[in-house]
Image (tube, helix red, strand yellow):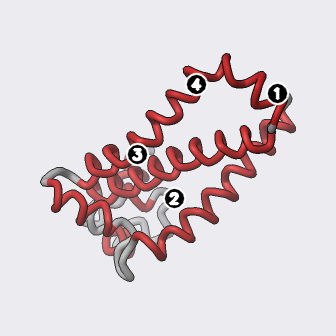
């Protein structure tokens, strides 16, 4: 795949992430917490929100793994018969897994810096922090201190 085609894949994926996560937010989050359902699921199943998310994402990862395993057998048939449907299925499965990983990133960052908004507003540097998750609860900008 040449660079232009690959960049098109990346741009399409980014666009799909925005669309899908935006639409799903209305369905799977509360008015105040985008990650609400993972936290409630964790309470229901006595695990961490991150573990609950990984449990839910496992169905996507297993499906992708099965598709990879079957790729050599099915790729010629799919490409010959209905390439658009074959590509759409891959895009959907890969997109689902990526979206769950983005949500996992949100859960992990929230756990590491639980009061991010409050800390960011008190950041000692006085200017917008290039990495808002680097401000600790005391308002000290860890990002700038490491530079």
Q: Quadrant of residue 116?
A: bottom left
Label 1 near label 2: C-beta < 8 Å? Answer: no
> Label 3, on which residue?
57
Q: What is the distance, in whole Å, between disc 2 and disc 1 at their CAs?
A: 34 Å
Mark 1 crowdedness (10 Å alpha carbons): few <14, some 14-19, many ≥20: few
Would you name the residue on which mark 2 appears?
130
Q: Secondary structure at mark 4?
A: helix
User: On the picture, is 57 further left or further right than 139?
Assistant: right
What residue does disc 1 label?
Answer: 1
Q: Residue at x 38, y 55 (%)?
A: 134
Q: Secondary structure at mark 2?
A: loop
List the residue tagged with mark 4: 68
Q: CA separation, marks 4 and 1?
A: 18 Å
Cα distance between the residues tagged 3 and 1: 28 Å
Residue pushed farthest bottom?
Answer: 31
Please determine whether, in this image, residue 76 is positioned above or below residue 30.
above
Q: Quadrant of the C terminus?
A: top left
* Comparing labels 2 and 4, the label whose residue is closer to the camera: 4
How far apart, in angstroms, are the residues tagged by discs 2 and 3?
A: 30 Å
Task: Judge depth for marks 2 and 1 and give the one in front.
Answer: 1
Percent position of residue 41, x then y: 24, 60
């Amino acid at each position: 795949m040449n660079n232009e085609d690959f960049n098109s894949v990346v741009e399409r994926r980014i666009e799909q992430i925005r669309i899908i996560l935006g639409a799903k937010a209305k369905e799977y989050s509360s008015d105040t917490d985008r990650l609400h359902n993972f936290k409630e699921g964790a309470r229901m199943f006595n695990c961490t929100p991150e573990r609950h998310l990984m449990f839910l994402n496992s169905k996507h990862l297993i499906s992708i793994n099965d598709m990879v395993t079957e790729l050599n057998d099915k790729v010629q048939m799919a490409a010959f018969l209905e390439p658009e449907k074959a590509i759409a299925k891959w895009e959907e499965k890969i997109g689902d897994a990526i979206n769950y990983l983005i949500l996992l990133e949100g859960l992990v960052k929230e756990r590491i810096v639980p009061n991010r908004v409050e800390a960011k507003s008190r950041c000692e540097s006085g200017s917008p922090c290039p990495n808002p998750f680097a401000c600790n609860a005391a308002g000290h900008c860890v990002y700038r201190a490491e530079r």
